[in-house]
Amino acid sequence: MKNLSLTTMKPEMIIVSFDRFRQVISCLLMAKKTRITVLNRGYQRG
């Protein structure tokens, strides 16, 4: 497995938290081929 750190991925945008608003923004950024990294502390799989 590759080492996936911020230095190896070189994101153009870092999104902190991932609520509905940031989810829409990240979709728009990814549609424009922008490399993003999402940091979400409170995520829980349900």
Image (spheres, grey):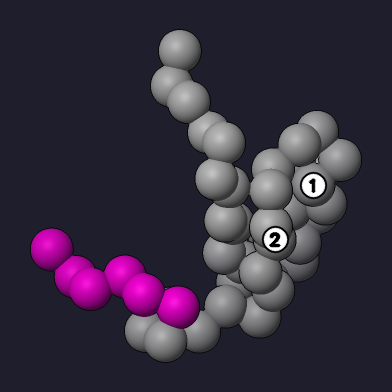
Dot 2: what SS?
Answer: strand
Q: Residue at x 13, y 63 (%)?
A: 1
List x then y, in percent, for residue 2.
19, 70
Neighbour class for label 2 at 10 Å: few (<14), some, many (≥20)? some
Residue 14 appears in which quarter of the rendering?
A: bottom right
Q: Are marks 1 and 2 in contact (CB under 8 Å)?
A: yes
Whether residue 31 is visible here, answered yes or no, is no
The residue labelled by disc 1 is 22
Q: Main secondary structure of the magenta part?
A: loop
- Which residues fall within the magenta stretch? 1-6
Q: Amino acid at mark 1?
A: Arg
On screen, residue 5 above or below 26: below
Q: Residue at x 53, y 33 (%)?
A: 43
* Mark found first going from the N terminus, 1 or 2: 2
Neighbour class for label 1 at 10 Å: few (<14), some, many (≥20)? some
The residue labelled by disc 2 is 15
Q: Amino acid at mark 2?
A: Ile
> In the current view of this chain or complex, which residue is farthest to the left?
1
Q: How many marks?
A: 2
36 vs 5, nearest the viewer: 5
Q: CA distance from mark 1 to mark 2?
A: 7 Å
